[in-house]
Image (spheres, rainbow, N blue to C red):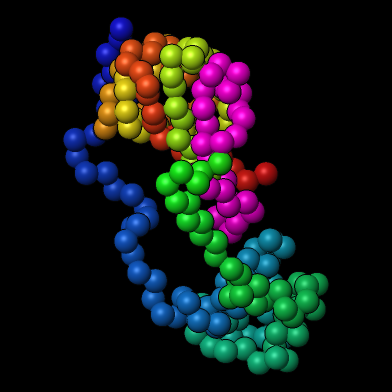
Amino acid sequence: MEDLPDSGTLPRTKPAFDQDPHRVREITERNLEAAIGREVRNFRRQQGMTVADLANITGLSIGMLSKIENGNTSPSLTTLQVLSHAFSVPVTAFFRSYEERREAQHVRAGEHIEIERRGTRSGHQYNLLGHIGSNSSGVVVEPYIITLTTESDTFPAFQHEGLELLYMLEGEVDYRHGDQIYSLKPGDSLFFDADAPHGPEGLVKLPARYLSVISYPQG
């Protein structure tokens, strides 16, 4: 069995990530003006316009448009009508992110749904922990609890788009990713590009359960 290569270990130095998961949004980012500004900016960019281009089309000043996009002013209904004509969208389109519902799903213990996936034929039990479809992030995430028993077969040839995170909860398996094999015990995790062949190659201690979180671009 091969050991984890150096290239697959976490760096010893603290990585610098672009996003702070504990950041609290400023109040201005939650208000109506900011929501309208984001939509104006999105429509402008989608249509390949600069702020100067939009100013020429609408007759609004560059300074005013900058204030609107940054959420620093409350545009009048007349201004919104002018912008809606410029983008060929209804006025209500500027309010959609403000009114958009953000979903959350609470699944109690024992209430998760058992579903069929490719590995089901090999005796792998998949329990879906929740599902949020089309959303503003542009990413689909599928969280599962996967259970392997004495009736399960090895299957190290899964391949699908996106990234996958495994977190071992119970038991022990030898898990293949590409040409590497990783011994996974409770508390271990494996994060990988799911386009490479992967899956449990050796069922060392059963029953085995692990959390699998798959993410991929929204279609």
Compared across the picture, whether 49 is left or right of 160 comes to right
Residue at image coords 60%, 56%: 135
**Does the stretch in magenta take in 138?**
yes
Q: Please indicate, yes or no, whether residue 188 appears anywhere in the rendered image.
A: no
In the image, residue 24 above or below residue 210: below
Q: Please indicate, yes or no, whether residue 110 appears anywhere in the rendered image.
A: yes
In the image, residue 151 above or below residue 41: above
Residue at image coords 70%, 91%: 77
| Quadrant housing the C terminus | top right
Residue at image coords 46%, 75%: 29
Q: Which residues are magenta?
A: 114-140
Q: Position of residue 62 (x, y in %)?
A: 60, 81
In the image, residue 143 above or below residue 116: below
The quarter of the picture where residue 53 lies is: bottom right
| Quadrant housing the N terminus | top left
Residue at image coords 56%, 16%: 122
Tally of numbered discs = 0
Q: Position of residue 192 (x, y in %)?
A: 43, 29
